[in-house]
Amino acid sequence: MSVKKLRSQAHTIFRAALEAADPASAVLRHVRIAGGRLCAGDKKYRLDSFDRVWVIGAGKASAAMAQAIERLLGSRIQGGCVNVKYGHLAKVRRIELHECGHPIPDDAGVRGAQRIAGMAQDAGQDDLVICLISGGASALLPSPAPPIILEEKRATTRLLLASGATIHEVNAVRKHISLLKGGQLARLAYPATVLSLLLSDVIGDDLDVIGSGPTAPDSATFQVAIGVLEKYGLTGKAPRTVMDRLESGARGEIADTPKPSDEVFLRVQNLVVGSNRLAVEAAAVKARQLGLRPLVLSTRIEGETRDVARMHAAIAREVVLSGRPVKPPACLISGGETTVTLRGEGLGGRNQEFVLAAAMDLDGVANVVALSGGTDGTDGPTDAAGAIADGATVSRARALGLDPARYLANNDSYHFFEPLGDLLKTGPTNTNVMDVRLLLVEK
């Protein structure tokens, strides 16, 4: 089999993963109407028992989720507002889609968050609030706790992302400098009934981490948030207003985020409708249909991107040399979300950096292709979802005067792959269930 065909198969398998992560389908698989009841997971709600139905939320996939809910409930919806990333839209009539910034929150996001908070607060005991949360909701639902201002919250987020903090750690801090995250949106909506539909973009599908858990009990505390900043040496770099709030909270001077025993959660259901696992399973099915032996390494991969890439490359080399842990033709598949510690000033994202690091370790290895892509269609602050490479990529790059080690050191994977024509571009997918990584190995 030619490398060209392997590359084509990699693209086909990635598209299958995207289709499985379709947010509208995910919603409709878990939510339906039967006998005048809204059935969500194992719970049923009598629709005639509610005065009004509101739809709120945030996330890169939440426009498509809103479209599915409108299709299901139609005129029963009183109104709603959902914050979405610029360009990540869908056709809706009763729910306002409010475009705003991601991954760095902006003023438009704050305005949308205020409108969402107002709807939640206005909901009464006999109302149903459907909350749609998907990947990116943390940045797309910015509501800084005064006197913290948005720029100070943005600065804190940038520090955490640049330090290599995990999504769990970033969210622990963001929840405690916000008015909506960490169960606080549910607290605003109480005593209304809240049904949250979650498209998970976090490892383990932890309810309090997906979108920073706006309707879920929070397991973190102010002291935990301080600990994250201490771990990465950021206590002296974070804005003073941020540290003042966290320290006041740790002293008990500010109410913490609501915990599992809080009464607000007696009227809240959090239901995960889609995840990275489903996307990875679909990739495995498609690989098998194409005549490859699929092997799912894990859907819980995290850690430093370039280290994870080299581990994947080492497994691919082992498949080539010994047929272990799977005989070729094979497709190694993994999911999850790695982190990049910024050392340079280049342009790229964790998926592009993964493929660059893998390509360097696979240099000269025949009949191997590596692809890594973000299911949201956006890898870092770029217009690419990721990249694709094979055993000849490094030699092709050097022929063009590109030094892969220099581009990796400068976190400049985008400009490495761009002249090679090896960027993976899907455009906005209106979904987000983390990343899918593929290594195809032929005999």
Image: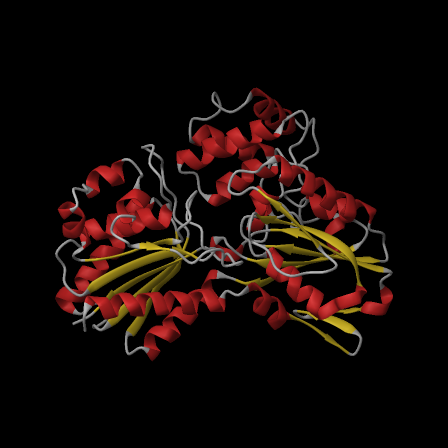
Residue 271 seen in this snapshot: no
Image position of 151 with respect to 354: above or below: above
Q: Horizontal and vertical percent for residue 405?
A: 20, 40
Asked which quadrant contains residue 382, the reply is: top left
Q: Describe residue 50's horizontal placement relative to residue 251 as left or right.
A: right
Asked which quadrant contains residue 424, the reply is: bottom left
Query: At 47% from the left edge and 22% from the top edge, which residue is drawn?
Result: 237
Q: Nearer the viewer, residue 319 or 2?
A: 2
> Coloring scheme of the render?
secondary structure
Q: Nearer the viewer, residue 90 or 354?
A: 90
Image position of 443 with respect to 216: above or below: below
Image position of 11 with respect to 401: above or below: below
Q: How many marks?
A: 0
Q: Describe residue 40's horizontal placement relative to residue 358 as left or right.
A: right
Image quarter in which the C terminus is found? bottom left
Query: At 68% from the left edge and 60% from the top edge, which residue is drawn?
Result: 92
Residue 176 seen in this snapshot: yes
Query: At 28% from the left edge and 49% from the top edge, which residue is drawn?
Result: 417
Q: Nearer the viewer, residue 315 or 83?
A: 83
Q: Describe residue 212's horizontal placement relative to residue 92 as left or right.
A: left
Q: Horizontal and vertical percent for residue 341?
A: 36, 37
Q: Horizontal and vertical percent for residue 137?
A: 58, 48
Q: Horizontal and vertical percent for residue 91?
A: 64, 61
Image quarter in which the N terminus is found? bottom left
